[in-house]
Amino acid sequence: MHTRSLSPSPALDDRVDRLRRLAQADPRLEGVLLYGSWTLGEADAHSDIEAYLYIQDDRLADFDGPAFLEQLAPLKLAYTNMYGILAVVFDDLMRGEFHLTAAGAGIDEVPTWEGMVHLPRPDDAVLLDRTGRLTRAARRLAEFRPPEPAATARQLIDELTNWTLMLAHVLARGETARAHNLLHAVVAPQQLQLCRLLRDSTAHWLTPSRALERDLPAADRDRYTSTTAAARHDDVRTAARESWRWSRDLAAEAADRWTLHLPRGARGLHEEISGLLD
């Protein structure tokens, strides 16, 4: 398989090519699948290298991931992160994330990623495939499948309602740091997903803040900015009010587009949440 440069980062392209050669020379590996920005053609000098290493089932227990990756470039850090992924930092400060996975069940799982993972050039993403299974599986991910609009909007509106009510209670309790985290780590990503759904800009669905400056109109970026705050009680309360206003505006827009029911009236849940925040 011929290496085709997809990024403006020669260092990343070289590392991908070297990973291909190392994998082909290691009989313990049945397949290697890249994912992330390189496979989407969006990589730059700050991008990571991310891959699944599909190891022969009977060799997984004795496969030394850091020792294998040390052949790519010297490592400054190597550890298993909170998601069970081998995370590394190379000597040039390029990050890497590598899933060390049993080939049998692992390759069978790849087609189940449809709708979540997009590999527009699956044959480039597959760096090694000794049996043909991985290539067939990866080709199932070549077509981008945006989320179903009405059901997804309904889910996001309900999520934003629930989590913003929790945010209001946490603020009322005086837990400013916890409220700050809820606002930015839980509520904001769901708002951005609902906004992307409405703007027909779902390419970065799983990481909705990615390329926000390029993907969303200035008015939406300004609304997002108004929902951010320093971790000071009054600032978080103000941002929470702005956040809920934006959530309600997005919900109303979605309701009009996809004929969704929203609670109405002074005793409706959405109004009651506004009252708590005010």
Image: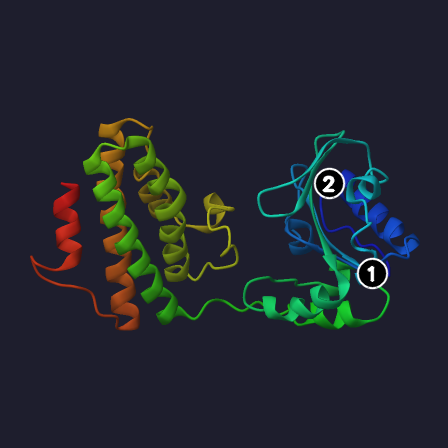
Is 220 situated above or below 194?
above
Residue 184: assigned label: none
Horizontal relation, residue 63 to residue 115: left or right: right
**Label 2 crowding class (10 Å Cα cut-off): few <14, some 14-19, many 20+?**
some
Which amino acid lies under the numbered mark 2 shown in the image of this protein? Ser
Mark 1 highlights which residue? 58
* Quarter the N terminus occupies: bottom right
The residue depicted at 43 percent of the width and 71 percent of the height is 148
Mark 2 highlights which residue? 9
| Furthest residue toward left | 266
Which amino acid lies under the numbered mark 1 shown in the image of this protein? Asp
Q: Nearer the viewer, residue 4 or 277?
A: 277
Horizontal relation, residue 211 to residue 278: left or right: right
Q: Nearer the viewer, residue 127 or 255?
A: 127
* Quarter the C terminus occupies: top left
Q: How many marks?
A: 2
Q: Nearer the viewer, residue 126 or 159?
A: 159
Choose mark 1 or mark 2, whichever is in front: 1
The residue depicted at 35 percent of the width and 52 percent of the height is 191
